[in-house]
Image (cartoon, rainbow, N blue to C red):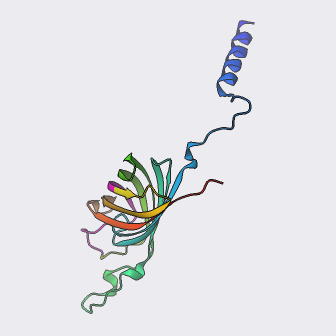
Amino acid sequence: MKKHFGLFFLLFISSEINSQPFGVPPTNTFQKTVSTFYFEVGGNAVFASLNYDLIFDSKYGVRIGISPGLFFIDSSTDNNREDYNYDLTALISAFKLYGSASHKVETGLGALFGEAITPREEKYPAVPALVLNLGYRFSTTKEKGLSFRLMFTPSINKNGLTPWCGASIGISFKNKIK
């Protein structure tokens, strides 16, 4: 009997803890989202990329990026085509922002997929890779405006740890809550 009473008591307490008051809608702190579209030179996607960030509650975010190989057409005749690879790469990462208002420090972790779009030398980042972010981010506090980032973006890949940097500029806007 004591076992049944103990089980009933635990179930009763847990249902009270998880219940919500009547008449009050649940709150969602992730309703405040900011989208950013930007062009990055250097950075996680090696030489240049187009990116989209979605920031939740001014603290956390996810990023997707794409680096089309068409940016890297080699016009010199002394290099063999086999020394270069111009395929598409994609980036996905998560990040956390520290700071207030417009000026923030960004830290992040992600993965770079695809084929190498760099010369096949060990001094360049290679794919696939684990990528890191550490740097400064400026985002407008208005409904829509300028955003830029300056980042230290090392990668861990088949060439080992490769230090790299990047700069980006784009536009941020607050998403409408429906």
Residue found farthest to the top: 2
Horizontal and vertical percent for residue 72?
35, 81
Query: Which residue occupies 46% across, 49% down?
Result: 58
Q: Is residue 133 magenta?
A: yes
| Vertical side of 36 occupied by 39: above or below | below
Q: Residue at x 24, y 90 (%)?
A: 78
Res. 152 in view: no
Q: Which quadrant does the C terminus fall into?
A: bottom right
Which residues make up the magenta segment?
120-136
How far from the left and from the top, in percent, is residue 6? 69, 12
Q: Is residue 119 magenta?
A: no
Q: Is residue 135 at all visible to an observer of this figure? A: yes
Picture mark count = 0
Would residue 125 be found to the left or right of residue 96 on screen? left
Residue 10: percent from left, percent from top:
67, 17
Image: 29 above or below 108: above
Residue at far front of view: 142
Location of residue 169 (image quadrant): bottom left
* Res 80 quadrant in image: bottom left
Residue 1 picture quarter: top right
Q: Nearer the viewer, residue 69 or 149?
A: 149
Q: Nearer the viewer, residue 60 or 112?
A: 60
Which residue lies at the image location 45% right of the left edge and 47% below the top edge? Answer: 59
